[in-house]
Amino acid sequence: MRGQLAPYVFLSPTLVLVTLFFFIPLVMVFILSFTNLDMTNFGILEWWSPANWSLDNYIKIFTNRFFSKILGNTIMYVVLTLTVFNVGLALVIALITTHINRRAGFAFRVLWFLPRITPVVVYIMMWKALAGPAPMGIINSILGPLGIGSGKYLLNTNPWVFIILANGFIGASFGMILFSSAIEAIPKDYLMASKVDGATTWQTIRYVELPALKWPLLFVTTYQTLSLLTSFQQIMLLTDGGPGLYQTEVWALTAYHRALTSYFGNTQWGYGAAWSVVLVIIGIVMAVIYLRVFKFGELVEEPKIDQL
Amino acid sequence: MKITIKALCKLFGKVKAVDNLALEIRDGEFVALLGPSGCGKTTTLLMLAGIYKPSSGSIRFGEKVINHLTPKERNIGMVFQSYALYPHMTTFDNISYPLKLKKVHKKEMMKRVQATADMMGIGELLDRKPAELSGGQQQRVAVARALVKEPAILLFDEPLSNLDAKLRLRMRGEIKRLQESLGVTSVYVTHDQVEAMTMASRIAVMNFGVLQTYGSPNQLYDHPDTVFVAGFIGAPPMNFLEMRFEERDDGFYLGSQALEIRIPDERGAQAKQNDVPQRVIMGSRPEDVSVVAERDGDFKAEVYLIEPLGREDLVTFRFDSEEIRALTPAPFHGQIGETMSLKLDKEKVHLFNPETKVSVLRSGNGGSS
Amino acid sequence: MIVRPKVKPVLAYLALVVPSSLVLLGFLWLLITSFSTRTEGLKSLGWTLHNWRFLWESPFGPGYPSIWQITLNTLLMSLIMTVIVVVVSSMTGYALARMKFPGRKSFLSLTLILHAFPSVTLLIPIYFVLLWITKIPLIGRGVPLLGGFGYNTVGGVALVMVAFQLPFGIWIMKGFFDNISWDMERSALIDGASRFKVWWQIIMPNIRPGVAALSVFSFLTAWNAYLIPLTFTAGRAGKSVVLSLYLQNFISESVMTEWNAVAAVGLFQLIPVVVFFLFTQEALLNIYGGGRKGGA
Ligand SMILES: Nc1ncnc2c1ncn2[C@@H]1O[C@H](COP(=O)(O)OP(=O)(O)OP(=O)(O)O)[C@@H](O)[C@H]1O
Ligand SMILES: [Mg+2]
């Protein structure tokens, strides 16, 4: 009996935190999404009473003029950042930094880790400086004398490029660290054996290292897809959805705008919640698809000690 | 502590790792669990230890059913094939760990750890970490850790298989001597039949989770119950030939294309009593096959392979499409390809039913469970 | 195929250097800006130490907490969060990797799915939850040092951050537990240890690299956290809770933002963790503990 309870004792801190900060909030968001709670009727509207619930918010979302624009933006943002940076470049950096001189590898990884540990406000300020118009902007001040570019504010001319770069540089370090450590964890015997067999570096990567990276690749892909879907801070600080109307607005940012900024005079908590709920559903569906496709179930081993 | 196992089963998904096992181990007895890889030996041991929960059946220590006791409550000591020492602890901490958990008084603990370590000959190594010990020394630490809490039952899971041949021989003797002097009921898992034969008072042979036979080493060797046991016990393994069983006026005969032998009357009668079918599997150990002068031979065969084993040579002969192996005193006087006469020791032939693979020489229900 | 090995090293460095140069330029500019009155590209239009004056005097009046006090706060909060993340992740990771209970696989999938819950979604309701915790006596407000675990307390902010860090921590720790030999754990149980003692006395000491790696990662994340502290602290006191919020003091909608000072404060916040990272990269590189099929 005690034995049967033991697992739940171990799980209890997580269960408490998850209940407090995921489940209760999620249920609340779910309920809120059926109401028109906002700053003006807060404290007056009985949002918990089913009498005040309706599907209006959802109808509003799906009939929104910019619905397809926002959805398209989100897909583009997630897919491009994920494939090019969070997985692609991360893998490239990991493979290169583990194959060059160890100290050089360390130095490059430090450099690539900087974006992740720089205060986000400062980090975005830095990107704005990079993109700035001539003569202040760094890129323009370098390219200008070479006769390249118009010298305009690059965030206005190419907002997506900078959004993806800024996010990608943060995202890449996550995969970089996991991939590098997975490569470092490959038993040296394997690498020796492959060298003895006369394999080129490329062949070693292809036949020894990449197969060993299967599991971290799956994990990073899944985890980062979800991270990207729900991330909005950088975009908010960089373009805030602009420069054109909804030009770089993604789903999570919309939810934030509706719920927490006074875009239209007040914060529409109910409407924002509805945007969030749809995003949660998209996220869960993505997660479940990943879990299925990557056969996570099979990767989970049965414990070899019974609970008595 | 007496152990009684009844109808014990363990399923892993659809795999029946242990199938309806029944076994009784007397107080202070040393029993070996023998069988090929994957036959369920470790699973059985871990059920005794309380690591695996039986799918069905019961285990008793003494008279008490202990199915639901945790490992802690069972008072057992176990030695693993991998030794399973705690790498972050010194030898002293490893050995004293069970005592620490029992909250044994510090002074008492020091004394018992030192005594056990001395007994195992590792008294000097107490402040080393496992990584700084040789395989043999690690093995001794593992045994000391299992012994120090004076368990009622000792479990060994192939404890010697990672040691070199010489060390293995030595540890075999030491463990045996230790067990005898302490008188602890012990279950010893191995797939090395020599180990089982030399150490155990009784051997339980398992295959595919099923108990094949349970008896003393001599019993298993002289009167194997099944084809599997006959083939598994004894090295080099027993020869098997398919033959006809015939009762004639003057006695009982076994025949095939190449040979015909008469077997002792009491063996024939016993077989008849056990409903021997017309076709039987005849078994004869290589040491019961001898090379003789032509007039004394039962049949002729061609030398196919000669393997010198030191004191004896193992010679493989071929006749018709069959093979038979003989242990002959070294050096063997013969050439590959040469035809020679062979003789079987009829007093020691074994007969099995080819359908059920069970011996037809069993008398009543003696010898096996 | 034959040419490749020769070309590769050059290509490799090129593939690294080109994108890296962008970051490098950015950080170079940040450094220059923090010591300048104004910049044009990477060119300083006048050097000054004015931006760094927050180090020796409070730019917001004498009553305002000094930067060193805030740095200490940040350190404290990051440490608290790191400890909780590592302990809780280890406990849960252990149960998920090593113990049988109904719903184990679903729970494991669930922890990953939790990561699909956008923090933005949950901010408002979490605000309500924290307000509710605040009302609980003692836990809400009365805890020394942390203030408590409710709204506008160091403890409360740390707890929320822990929750968002858990999915990652649990999966990482589970990978380490997967690689520990079963026999060692069985042996400890037979020696008479409870599952809790096995976890704490036998398993944890053997996954120190994992603990170190996750600690480094969590610490870096916590040090830098922005959105959650911003949302769950309030007022002038709130803005002095951690460094990333202290920055907010310089950014205002009414007065001209002193961007050069922001750069200086940002660098001030960044430099200690870069040094920390330099010394702990080796540890962080152990973060992949496996978690493939297998284990003895
Ligand atoms: N935890 C487990 N989960 C699933 N199947 C298992 C587990 N443990 C053992 N088995 C299966 O049960 C059968 C018996 O395994 P067991 O370890 O008892 O064999 P064994 O006789 O000890 O073999 P060996 O001599 O190789 O150690 C095998 O088919 C094995 O694959
Ligand atoms: Mg085994």
Image (tube, coloured by chain):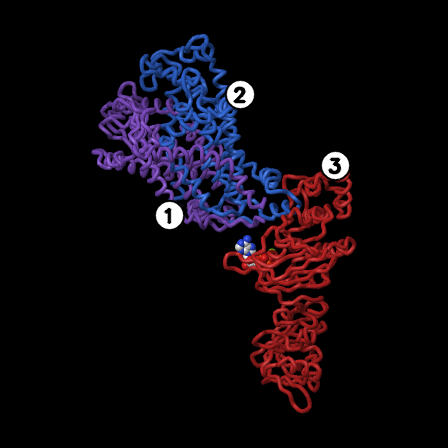
Chain colours: A purple, B red, C blue
- Label 1 near label 2: C-beta < 8 Å? no
- Label 2 near label 3: C-beta < 8 Å? no
From the viewer's side, name the closer residue of A178 and A69.
A69
Label 2 marks a residue whose chain is C
Label 1 marks a residue whose chain is C
Q: Are the numbered discs 3 and 1 placed on the same chain, yes or no?
A: no
Q: What residue lies at 70% left-to-right and 83% top-to-bottom?
A: B264
Please provide percent x and percent y for residue B354: 58, 77
Number of residues whose C-alpha sits closer than 10 Å to that of mark 2, classed few (under 14), some (14–19) or many (20 or more): few
* Disc 2 residue type (three-letter): Leu
Direction left: furthest residue: A65
- State the residue position of label 1: C1
Which label number is shown at residue B106?
3
Question: How far apart are labels 3 and 1 at the CA level?
Answer: 68 Å
From the viewer's side, name the closer residue of C224 and A126.
C224
Tag 1 or tag 2, which sits nearer the N-term? Answer: 1
Image depth: mark 3 or mark 1 in front: 3
Beta carbon of the mark 1 residue lies under 8 A of ligand 1: no
* Disc 1 residue type (three-letter): Met
Q: Report helix, strand or loop for mark 3.
A: helix
Direction bottom: furthest residue: B249
Please provide percent x and percent y for residue A281: 34, 40
Above or below — where is B131 with respect to B259?
above
Please provide percent x and percent y for residue B109: 75, 40
Image quadrant where residue B298 sits: bottom right
* Disc 3 residue type (three-letter): Lys
Q: Report helix, strand or loop for mark 2.
A: loop
- State the residue position of label 2: C145
Q: What residue lies at 66% left-to-right and 43% top-to-bottom?
A: B130
